Every structure is written in C-alpha cells, then in structure tokens.
Amino acid sequence: MNFKRTITPIGLLFAGIGSIIGSGWLFGPLYAAQIAGPAAIVSWIIGGVLMIIIALTFAELGSAFPVAGGMIQFAQYSHGPLLSFLIGWMVWISSVAVAPVETLGIIQYLANYIPGLMETSSGVHLLTYLGMFLAAMIMFLMCFLNFYGAQFFSRSNSIITAIKLIVPIMTVVILLKLNFEPSHFSDEKTGGFAPFGWHGILAALPLGGVIYSFIGSNTVLQLAGETKNPQRSIPLALIGSMIFCIFLYAFLQMAFIGAVSPEAFASGWNKLHYEGDTGPFSGLIAALGLSWFIVIIYADALISPFGTGFVFTASTARISYGLSQIGFLPKTLLRLTQKGVPLRSIFLNYLVGLLLFLPFPAWQKLVSFIISCFILSYIIGPIALIGLRKSQPDTPRPFFLPFANVISLTAFYICNLLIFWTGWETVSRMMIALSIGLLFFAGFCYRHKNNLWWKEWRGAWWILPYFSILTLFSYLGSFGNGKNILTFGWDFLYVFALTCVIFYAFKKPRKII
C-alpha cells in the first residue's frame, strides 16, 4: 500500500510554518539575548538566511524525488546504504526527540498551575514522575490524532498553525506599542548593540534556540510522498515558511529586547534575569499588568508546542518508514492502515520518545541533543544534489536550482560551520551518537552475511576522516568550551578548507549496491 497524496500545497506550507513555530518562540529570544545581547536580532536573520541556502538544495531534491522520508532516500539514491543509514540514523533520533522536547515545553508552563509536574535542581527544571506520566499522555494524544491520516493531519494542522500565528504576532504588537525602549539597543554600560561581537552572534545560532526553531522546515520533505503537486508545493512550502518565520522571529526578538527592564540586564546581557523568566514573554507581559493576555500566552504555550510535536509525530513516522524501505528497520513497519498511516512506525517512535525522558528530563538538555544531530543530517542536501545530477540527469526537475555547484558548496560550508558553532561539548555528544549508528550498521551487515559493509566502506571511507577532522577543529576552536587554539576568524578558513576537500573529492555518486 502506498501513501495517499492528500496534503494540499497550502496544507504543506502550514505544516512547514507550524513545525517552525513551536516552543522556540517561547524560549529562544531569552536565550539568544543572553548569548548575543541586542544583536540577537542579527542572529535570527543570519540563521534564517543560512537555512534558506541549505533549503534550496533540498527544494530541487524534493521536487525531483517526492518520496516519504526524503532525506534518507536522497542519500540512498546518491551514495548508497552507508551514508543513507548514517543520515537516517541522525535524522530519526533527532526527529523522535522533537515531540518530547515540545511536550517538555508544555509541561514547563503547566507546572506554574499544577504543582508536582517539575522540580528544580541547580537552576534546571526537571520532570517529576507525575510530569513524565502527563508527558506520556500528551504524546499519546499526538499519536492518536495522527492515526486519522494525512488529510486529517493537513486540515487540523492548518487550523492549529493559524491559531499559533495569532499569539506571537499579538505579543509583538503589544510590546512594541506599550513597552518598547530603543535605548536598550545601544546602552554602552552593557556593551552596546553587540556586547559579545560576532562570536556571540554566531554562537546564538545553535545555542540560543535559533537553529532549533528553523529546523522544523524539514517536515516538508518527510511529507513529500503525501503531497498533491509536490513539484510546486515543496519549494513553495520550504522557502515560503522560512521567509515568513525570519520576519516573525526577528520582530519577536526586537520586541523582547526593547521591553525587558534595564535592571534585568544591568550586570550584563549574559546575566539577563527577571521574575517570571521561566516563561520569558509571560514574565514581560505580567510586568505590564495585562493579566488577560497572560492567559492567552499560557494557552498558546500549550497550542504551539503541541502543534509542532503533532507535525513531527507525523513526519518522523515517515522517516522510520523510509529506514524500513531500505532495509535498516524491520519490514513490518512498511504496513500502512487503510487511511495510509504508518501506525507501527508511529508506535515505535512513541516508545523511543518516552525513553528519551530518562537521560534528558529538561528542555535545554534535549534541545542541545536535537540540534547536534539535525545539523549533521543536513550535509546530505548539497552532496546529494550534485551527485544525483550526475547519476540521474534525465530525472525531471521542476525546480532546477541555478548555480547549483556554487550554492551547494556554500550550503555544505554552512552545514560545517553550524556543526562547528555548536561547540565542543555538543559535537562530542554528536560523535557518540554517530558512533553508535556505525555499530548498528556493522551489526546489520553481519546479520545479512554479505560484503555490504566492506564494499560500502571502500566507497565512503572519507566519512571517518571528515568527521574526525571536524571534531578536532571543534575541540581546538573557541565555541562550547573548546581550547581556543583555532582562534575566532581563522577557524572560518580551516573549516572552508575541509569543506572544499570533501566536496570536490567525494561528492561524486556511486552505484548503489
């Protein structure tokens, strides 16, 4: 049974916007301001533009190969099983974690009204056993609603997304009108507009919730197999959702910076703190005495994260479906319901998501894990685009990316920079997750009693030195407690050199074994 193409172009666009606007808007402006100060506005603009460049490569791939679990399939088509497994492994793990992290965002707000859901340890809000039980129920509801199929998903998500858009827009309008102080952007006592320079602006991309907010757009690719007119819908939804959210997040950050009280950042933006900042915008609104709008914000704190978790519950099931198609997960996951829903994949992801609450019971910890895995998976876009143009030149490409070599090289460089900017602590955890994936792949090849592992390793041996060198750069760099041996500025050149070597030497496709 095949997926049914029932998602409309507008439904796909709303799916992209809906997955971008989640708990990121509720927490990101605070964390980004702590890292970059008022220049966090620049972080949102840069982050969105960089992600659009990467998305351009996926727009052509998605229009040419509109299949479920797109990112995995692109790697399979272009470079074979090893790379597709590693990409699929990282995409799957990070995507499975999105529903839990959005559920954590919901519960963190609910804890203000329902005691016992969370406890605080060393300044970090952690789930209690009661909170874990409620989290399991919320995630089960996401799965239950997805059971009704893609058409229900498309219609209901459009409604949820429309609701989600109203509150952040109202928040911007209220703060700009009632409590906006332009002098906060140039206060010399706290370092002026960019107190931490370009280092802070770039560090805020992965560590301030900026990139986490924008990665939601990849759900468009995972739903490609169920989209009407995918050749037109996919580029429109990918790029359109990103452009819209760049403006929204930039205005949210501007409104936040202008509305926060001077006492909150008197000791420096890196020590930004005020009463009620566990819900950053609700704390600002409370200071204005608008109790009616606080209720609306708390309501949206339930709807926005739930909407994003709802979208990812659908798209992640398609990722595990794609892994099953190429043989890395059991074939039993390929069975669909009469509505075309991969119910078994949804149930598997639900169980794995519940397990993630044990090592990552806090929003900040789980977000860091997601970012490291997601960014790694994005390298397949620029590599597969050039590879598939050579190996499958006759495949129709309704969206044909101009200057593909230049844009693909730039996108690959951006991916490597984003990985580097996450910092040593995050990159080291990412490499552990990647190593576990390699062990699973080796076990897969051993079980099948063939030479697949050896043949694939000969064709993709560059993966090991590539990731090893990038990890070494991260260890020697100035981000995330690195050793600061590769000083800021020079590190751009080192990462660019590595990018060029890998891109030009190993971008060529190979025959799938």
Image (cartoon, rainbow, N blue to C red):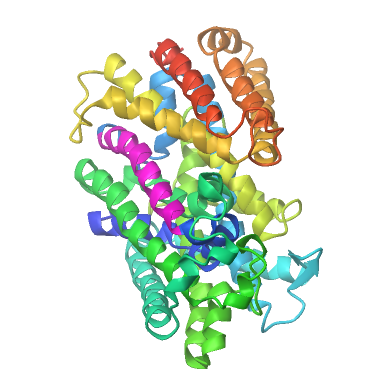
Quarter-of-image position of residue 170: bottom left
Q: Looking at the image, which residue sits at the far right?
A: 121
Q: Which residues are magenta?
A: 41-63
Tell which of 441 and 217 is nearer to you: 217
Q: For the point 60% across and 54% down, which residue is it?
A: 350
- Write the residue at 26% across / 32% down: 64
Residue 342 in the image, given as x and y percentages of width and height: 47, 48
The answer to whether residue 366 is above or below residue 505 is below
Question: Could you say which quadrant of the image residue 442 lies in?
Answer: top right
Residue 48 in the magenta stretch? The answer is yes
Q: Residue at x 27, y 45 (%)?
A: 234
Between residue 378 and residue 333, name the one nearer to us.
378
Residue 332 at least partly seen: no
Quarter of the image that includes the N terminus? top left
| x, y percent for residue 5 | 28, 48
Q: Main secondary structure of the magenta part?
A: helix
- Position of residue 301 measured from the top left corner of the image (x, y, whole percent): 53, 74
User: What residue appears at the point 37 percent right and 25 percent down from the top-left corner?
Assistant: 409
| Percent of width and height locating residue 155 | 32, 65
